[in-house]
Image (cartoon, rainbow, N blue to C red):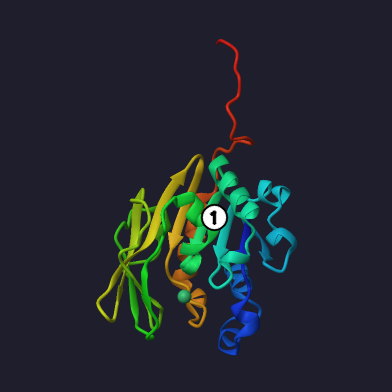
Amino acid sequence: MIRVTIFNEFVHERTEERVREVYPDGIHMTLKRALECEDIEVKTVTLLDDQCGLTDDVLKETDVIIWWGHMAHGQVPNEVAQRVRDHVQMGMGAIFLHSAHESKPFKLLMGTPCSLTWREDGDFERVWTVNPAHPIAQGVGRFIYLPHEETYGEPFTVPEPLETVFIGGYEGGEVFRSGLTYRRGNGKIFYFQPGHETNPTFKIPEIQKVIKNAVYWANPIYRTTSLGCPHVEKP
Ligand code: ZN
C-alpha cells in the first residue's frame, strides 16, 4: 500500500464562492477521490490542522506527499517546511502542484527563487508530453488539452531539472516547463504546473492520471531515518 498525504492550504475554497463552486469540499478531497484505489491510501491535512497536520509521526508514515498552496504559503510554519524537506531528503516522495512552486518546502528543496511570469486570461493550454518514455507520462498521449488554465510563463527560476516530462504551451504563445523531476537526497520530487483554483483542472482524467503516475514513480524504494553522519566500524 502506498501511503499518500495531501496537504492543501484550503483557503480559497472557504473564502471565495467561485472556487467553492469548483471544489465544494476542497481541492484535497477531489485529489483524494482521484487517487484512492486498491494500492493507494490517502490522508488529507490542511492549514486548519495543528502543525498543518504534518508532524514527524505523520511524515514517517507518508510515502508520498502532495502539496497545493497559493495565498497562505506564509502561514506554513518554517519548522513544518523544514520537516517536510528533511523527510524528502530521507526518501519521502513529493509532488508539488501549480502554485506550490512558491511554497516553503519546494523553495527549501530547490534553493532558488522558483519565480515565474503569470497572467490570468482564461487561455487554453496544451500540456505537451516531451518525454513519452517517462513513467509519469504513461497513458497520457501526445498532449493534454486544458480549456482554461492560468498562464505560467518562463523564466521559471528553478534549478535545471533531472528530467523534463511536460512543456505547457498557451493560447498567448507562452511556454512553460510544466512537468519537472528532481532528486534531493533519497527523495524523488515532481513539479506539475496545471491546477489553478478557479478551473476544474483536477477533475480532468488525464491530469488525475499524471498525478497518480507520479505517486507510483515517487514512492520510495529506499529511505533512511536520519540525515546525520553515522560512525561505522571498519569492514
Ligand atoms: Zn493559480
Question: Which residue lies at the image location 37% right of the left edge and 67% below the top edge?
Answer: 116
Residue bearing the label numbered 1: 105
Quarter location, residue 234:
top right
Does residue 36 appear anywhere in the picture?
no
| Residue closest to the far left | 173
Task: Classify mark 1 as within 8 Å of ligand 1 or not, answering yes or no.
Answer: no
Question: Which residue lies at the image location 48% right of the left edge and 68% below the top edge?
Answer: 99
Image quadrant where one finds the C terminus: top right
Quarter location, residue 12:
bottom right
Residue 63 lies, in percent from the top left, at 61, 49
Question: Which residue lies at the image location 60% right of the left edge and 17% below the top edge?
Answer: 232
28 or 39, which is in the foreground? Answer: 28
- The answer to whether 219 is drawn above or below residue 148 in the figure is above
Does residue 194 appear anywhere in the picture?
yes
- The answer to whether 14 is drawn above or below residue 180 in the figure is below
Q: How many marks?
A: 1
| Label 1 secondary element | helix
155 or 1, which is in the foreground? Answer: 155
Residue 170 lies, in percent from the top left, at 30, 77
106 or 145, which is in the foreground? Answer: 106
Residue 84 lies, in percent from the top left, at 60, 51
Residue type at mark 1?
Pro
Taking the image as shown, residue 216 lies to the left or right of residue 112, namely right
Taking the image as shown, residue 24 lies to the left or right of residue 190, namely right
